[in-house]
Amino acid sequence: MVHVSDFHKAYDAKVAVSGLSFTVGPGQILGMVGPNGAGKTTTLRAMCGVIPPSQGSIAIDGFDVQSNPVDAKLRIAYVPDDPKAFDVLTVWEHMRYTASAYGIKDFADKAAALLDRFELTEQRDKMGGELSRGMRQKMALCCAYLHNPKVVLLDEPMTGIDPLGIRTTKQSIREQAANGAAIVLSSHLLDIVEDLCTDLLILHVGQCLFLGTLDEARDRFRTNQGETSLEEAFINATSKGNGPPPLPSMEQIDPKE
């Protein structure tokens, strides 16, 4: 469903991500973790076509994000780490706008059910500019799920959400995967990654340190004979001396490799 091949992203001469390749299939939930500046948000933004790769390719359900952007984006839902709202649109108008963008005609029942599930029914006539951080996050999730996406990209989706909302969000992610969606979840909250994800990608200074299951990560980065938590594995993987070599410059990358 998701195929990232030799993805590089540079801003002028500065390389943010180098040589990243991975796939995510239907029903998988890939946790993307890494220190600040590791390249997680850059990768997610490139996957949904917000920014172009400097090198490499990204395909969604067989459609290249650069050469077939409309077909690829019709299959994606992307929730950024700080979703913005249109100040002059109500919550319900955001849902209507999303339905129109994806060509959904009979959206009202599903939209109402989503707002009810995420405790936004009483806010449906509130303007986007009046919403709290957590309400914007919940509204973004409602809009994301409206068109039954095949790929769901989530960047810190729990930020600002209350405990009940976190439970609802976690359950909704599991349901999306159970219905066949491929999920990529970026988060610093490793307990949520450990609870939700089937697979793990550890990024460090723009490069892949690890790609595999959570159990494989715990085994690989174990420092003692006892049980290793994901947090311990992550810290061991990204601690000084264990990370990848410095990123190359774009001049050092051979586009034929």
Image: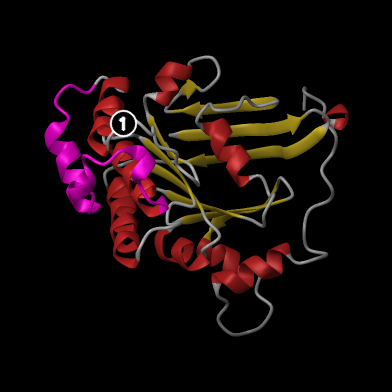
- The residue at 30%/38% (across/down) is 127
Residue at 55% x, 81% y is 227
Quadrant for the N terminus, please.
top left
Identify the residue shown where x is 15% and y is 41%.
Answer: 112
| Occupied quadrant, residue 145 | top left
Which image quarter is the C terminus in? top right
Q: Residue furthest right?
A: 252
Quarter-of-image position of residue 219:
bottom right
Asked if one can make out residue 103 in the rendered structure from this viewpoint, the answer is: yes
Q: Position of residue 232 (x, y in %)?
A: 62, 74
Element carrying mark 1:
loop
Q: Nearer the viewer, residue 123 or 193?
A: 123
Q: Residue furthest top?
A: 67
Report the side of 193 relative to 35 (left or right).
left
**Residue type indicated by callout 1:** Leu
Q: Is residue 115 magenta?
A: yes
Task: Judge from the rendering whether residue 14 lies leftward or rightward of residue 215; answer left or right.
Answer: right
Q: Is residue 113 left or right of residue 25?
A: left
Binning the other alpha carbons within 10 Å of mark 1 as few (below 14), some (14 to 19) or many (20 upward) gives some
State the image coordinates of residue 225 (x, y, percent, origin top left).
Answer: 63, 84
Q: Is residue 154 above or below residue 217?
A: above
- Residue nearest the observer in this picture, 238 or 128: 128
Left-right relation of 14 to 36: right
Q: Name the residue nearer the viewer: 163 or 177.
A: 163
* Percent position of residue 51, x then y: 60, 27
Total marks shown come to 1
Q: Which residue does the numbered mark 1 point to in the structure image?
A: 89
Q: Which residues are magenta?
A: 104-133
Q: Where's residue 174, x and y in %? A: 32, 54
Q: What residue appears at the point 44 percent right and 38 percent down from the top-left corner?
A: 84
Q: Which coloring applies here?
A: secondary structure
- The foreground one among 92 and 6 is 92
